[in-house]
Amino acid sequence: MSTIFGLVTEGSVLMISPANIPTYWFVLPLVIAMSCVYSASRHESWAKISVQSLRLSGMILGILFLAMGLLLLINTQV
């Protein structure tokens, strides 16, 4: 039995075990869902909703990556 990216392979059978899925796999769907709901609460046009949700998703992911980079930099300096 081997584990690759949270997926457990047992022989030729691929099984997904919830206990083995890394937490970071859930960040992207949560950010997308959160930005779509926020944009839909502000706008009524599908075009505006999609543009704003993409922009907001990019901003949130950018802030998350900057924070991760800063924390990694601090962690390697100690």
Image (cartoon, rainbow, N blue to C red):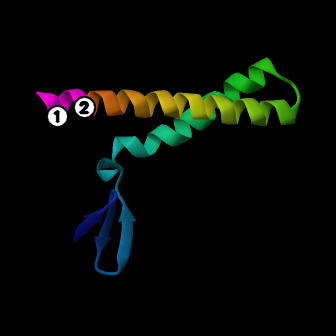
Q: Residues within 10 Å of mark 1 (few under 14, many from 20)?
A: few
Q: Nearer the viewer, residue 46 or 69?
A: 69
Which residue type does callout 1 highlight? Thr
Tell me how far mark 1 sits from mark 2, CA to CA.
5 Å
Q: Which mark is residue 73?
A: 2
In which quadrant of the rendered view does residue 23 lie?
Answer: top left
In which quadrant of the rendered view does residue 67 lie?
Answer: top left
Report the residue marked by disc 1.
76
The vertical placement of 19 against 47, above or below, is: below
Q: Check if mark 1's residue and mark 2's residue have beta carbons within 8 Å.
A: yes
Picture coordinates of residue 24, whole percent (x, y): 39, 42
Q: Please tell me whether residue 22 belongs to the stretch shown in magenta.
A: no
Disc 1 is placed on an element classified as: helix
Which residue type does callout 2 highlight? Leu
Q: Residues within 10 Å of mark 2 (few under 14, many from 20)?
A: few
The vertical placement of 44 against 24, above or below, is: above
Residue 53 relative to residue 68: left or right:
right
Residue 51 relative to residue 66: left or right:
right
Picture coordinates of residue 29, whole percent (x, y): 55, 41
Residue drawn at x 33%, y 47% as measured from the top left? 22
The vertical placement of 32 against 7, above or below, is: above
Disc 2 is placed on an element classified as: helix
Quarter of the image containing the C terminus?
top left
- Secondary structure mostly seen in magenta is helix
Magenta-tinted stretch: 73-78
